[in-house]
Amino acid sequence: MKFIKFLVVGIVFGIVMAKSEALSWYRIQEMFRFQSFHMYGIIGTAVTLGVIGVALIKKFKLRDFEGNPIQFHPKEKSVARYLIGGSIFGLGWALSGACPGPMVVNIGYGYLTMAVVFLFATLGTFLYGVIKDKLPH
Amino acid sequence: MQSVIEFIQQPWSWWFSGAIISSIMFILLFFGKSFGFSANLRTICTVAGAGKKVPFFNFNWKTQIWNLVFLVGAIIGGFIANQFLSNGEAVQISQSTISDLSALGFAAPTSVQPEELFSWEAAFSVKGFLILALGGLMVGFGARYAGGCTSGHAISGISDLQIPSIIAVVGFFIGGLIMTFGILPLIF
């Protein structure tokens, strides 16, 4: 039962991905072609509110519902892994039109062929785990 | 009531959608978790037994059950959106995108996704299957290599003003632009 709240938040996430059309390959193409404000508006609004909210959480040292301080984990400093990894991600994002979240939302929406994309994304993560020590980080 | 239903069935505006996405991030923070969807791909590998052979997957996946539940919710959310909250209209992309894509052989949108890529017919052709498979492979590999995807870096990381996340998003666009302007014209 303690997980039911995450199910509800996940459902809201799925609905907003669908209703904002962020799950659509067409919208991702439009974004990478800089031909509409739509996707930038979505991400920009989320980030603007996010920056303000995170600053407030830190300023007032807010706690989560269990009373533990809300913590942010700084990511390790590097350029190579973010730039190379990010670029590989971007190649896949523009080709399949979906990042991991929208992939599963698409499956629920009825685009069952997106399961192929998701399966191979899982395989891609596995491949990373196998060869990670050989990659620049 | 009728007007509320009509409002919901329209595509949602960017500002409303963005505000909900940021609320999702904050709700997860108040539940003591952090918003990062691609972590699920690693967890799925671990649940499938990858941790026995590959150290990267050897972690206590039970700490990530909440995120898998979130994933199941996302699937249900997609189903609900299509069944009950959709008016069945095509995605309203800009005219310039429609003409750019038509030069690559894509018809104007009639629904959410192009038949040219996501119909069973396309997915079972050699070229179509390779597109879906390689697209997915690069997303999954790149997300873990970069330490996060759109939710972990572009939303959560940048909200925390993390330089690594900004670099990762620059990477997302380098790759996305190379694919869009360099590679897509070669394969379509």
Image (cartoon, coloured by chain):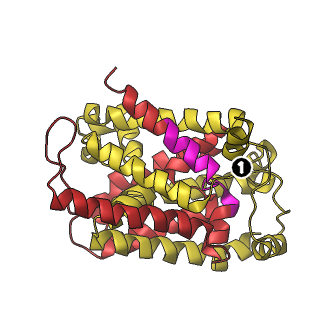
Above or below, A103 against B154 in this view is above
Residue B50 lies left or right of residue B149; in this view the side is left
Quarter of the picture containing the C terminus of chain B is bottom right
Name the residue rendered at 32%, 75% in the picture: A80
Amino acid on which the number 1 mark rests in the picture: Gln
Residue B67 in percent (x, y) is at: 37, 38
Depth order, front residue of A69/A126: A69
Residue B146 in percent (x, y) is at: 36, 64
Chain B drawn colour: yellow
Span shown in magenta: A11-26
Residue B125 in percent (x, y) is at: 77, 50
**Quarter-wise, where is residue B49 in the image?**
top left
Number of numbered markers: 1
> Is any part of residue B33 visible from this angle?
no
Residue B166 in percent (x, y) is at: 36, 73
Depth order, front residue of A24/A5: A5
**Crowding near pointer 1: few (<14 within 10 Å), some, many (20+)?**
some
Depth order, front residue of B2/B133: B2
Residue A68 lies left or right of residue A125; in this view the side is left
Which chain gets the red colouring? A
> Is any part of residue B55 visible from this angle?
yes
Where does label 1 land, which residue? B10
Name the residue rendered at 24%, 42% in the picture: B32
Q: At numbered mark 1, what does the secondary structure look like: helix, strand or loop? A: loop
Depth order, front residue of A81/A64: A64
Indicate the chain on which mark 1 is placed. B
Residue A23 belongs to the span the image colors magenta:
yes
Which residue appears farthest toward the top when viewing the image?
Answer: A1
Residue A98 lies left or right of residue B70; in this view the side is right
Above or below, B41 against B146 in this view is above
Name the residue rendered at 69%, 46% in the picture: B7
